[in-house]
Image (cartoon, rainbow, N blue to C red):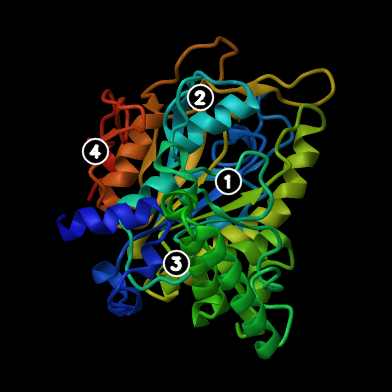
Amino acid sequence: MKRREFVQLAGGMGLSFLLPGLSFADAKKRGKERIKSLITLWLAGGASQLETWDPHAGTLIGGETGSIHTKMNGLQIADMYPQVAEQIHHLSVIRSLTSKEGDHERGTYYLKTGYRPDPTLIHPSIGAIAAHELPEPGIEIPQHISLLKSQWPARGGFLGPGLDAFKIQNPGLNLQNMKALVSGTRQKQRLEGLEKLTSSFANGRFSRLKRTMHRQTIDRALTMMRSEQLKAFLIEDEPKAIQNSYGDTRFGRGCLVARRLVEQGVRAVEVTLKGFDTHANNYEGHLTQAKILDPAFASLIDDLKQRDLLDSTVVLCIGEFGRTPQINPVGGRDHWPHGFSCVVGGGGLRSGVLIGETDISTEKKPPANPIHIPDLYATVFKTLGVDFEFEYDTPIGRPMRIVDKKARVIQRLVS
């Protein structure tokens, strides 16, 4: 077996951080020479494009939302985001994303995997694929991590549960369930007892024990529990000015932890901000969420830039779909997958690019210059260094490409 195949196999089993040769040379580098990571800011519920990255101030569909100029030439965003307006020129904006999934669960599945739901198969999320295809030897903590509670967290799919996102629901404040609750001596005694029980069960059942991956799972957990890399989950050693800049919110702390994790060498991190399902009081709901998202998102971009990490970190801010151009009778906007927006950049992608525009009609038709979800992920994988045309053999022998065969790289975003 070739080394690359061995590394990928270990990554698929969720054991890549147990590989030999613990070296953090790549993780310690800065700039373009550093290994690449992915941070996804997931706006759960479907953020309105008209209250975020494509406002139509002063129009009927624009509602109460005003607009603000940014440092990106020709771009105005919602006036709820003054701090992002100062940083968004480091990234790019797509205003013409289009999807065919208008249900929350199905839309989330499509946006997190690049594939529409299929009852015969569970596709891996883009973070799981990145961790699988680009395992980094020496990382003793999971390489695919989800911060904050998510109703439909990123999964490993047919690549295996070992690539499911490792979930932290309250990032930055504690290491719950990751540190022993007893003294070192007591812990040693417990582990010795566990080993005796395991050995007793293994007697005459070696193949069955091997299939359970019991020993590997225990070794994996203990390796992580003893690792200094766990400090990446905490923020107490960060300067107060940095902590405050992200905002005193769970999401703000999650974004700060995401920066610390990719700095450590973690491959993919997802941070969830819920509350965008605004079928009523849409403007007020987005205003509340903007107070959380604006400082956290802006500080993340600035922090990555200041630490020379933005060239090695793809940042994607996206949700499962957008909201309707029309405002309903209770002041809300409903589901609208036909044309919505995202912010993407870093990792070597071009910055300051504006693609497409929101379709302001109420007809369910694709916007001008539509960007399909697989196109977006083909572009993300290309800049991460993943061969998005690679074809897996699923456990049932079904061939499945990393990205749909119709996908095309968005050339305007590729340097």
Residue displayed at 47% across by 49% down:
208
Q: Which residue is mark 1?
A: 42
Given the image, on which type of amino acid does mark 1 rest? Trp
Q: Which mark is residue 411?
A: 4
Q: Which mark is residue 400?
A: none
Given the image, on which type of amino acid does mark 2 rest? Gly
Q: Position of residue 77 (x, y in %)?
A: 56, 44
Q: In the rendered structure, which disc, 2 or 3, sits on the residue that comes first in sequence?
A: 3
Which image quadrant is residue 182 in?
bottom right
Q: Which residue is mark 2?
A: 339
Determine contact: label 2, label 4, CB under 8 Å.
no
Q: Nearer the viewer, mark 4 or mark 3?
A: 3
Residue 352 shows in the view: no
Q: Nearer the viewer, mark 1 or mark 4?
A: 1
Q: Residues within 10 Å of mark 3 (few under 14, many from 20)?
A: many
> Taking 226 as reference, is 57 above or below it?
above
Q: Using the numbered discs, state the Cα–Cα distance from disc 2 to disc 4 in whole angstroms.
A: 20 Å
Q: Which residue is mark 3?
A: 262
Q: Residues within 10 Å of mark 2 (few under 14, many from 20)?
A: many
Q: In the rendered structure, which disc, 1 or 4, sits on the residue that comes first in sequence?
A: 1
Residue 308 shows in the view: yes
Q: Is residue 239 left or right of residue 210?
A: right
> Taking 141 as reference, is 65 above or below it?
above
Q: In the rendered structure, which disc, 2 or 4, sits on the residue that comes first in sequence?
A: 2
Q: Using the numbered discs, state the Cα–Cα distance from disc 2 to disc 1 in whole angstroms.
A: 17 Å
Quarter the N terminus occupies? bottom left
Q: Using the numbered discs, state the Cα–Cα distance from disc 1 to disc 3 in whole angstroms.
A: 17 Å
Q: Position of residue 178 (x, y in %)?
A: 64, 71
Q: Position of residue 328 (x, y in %)?
A: 77, 19
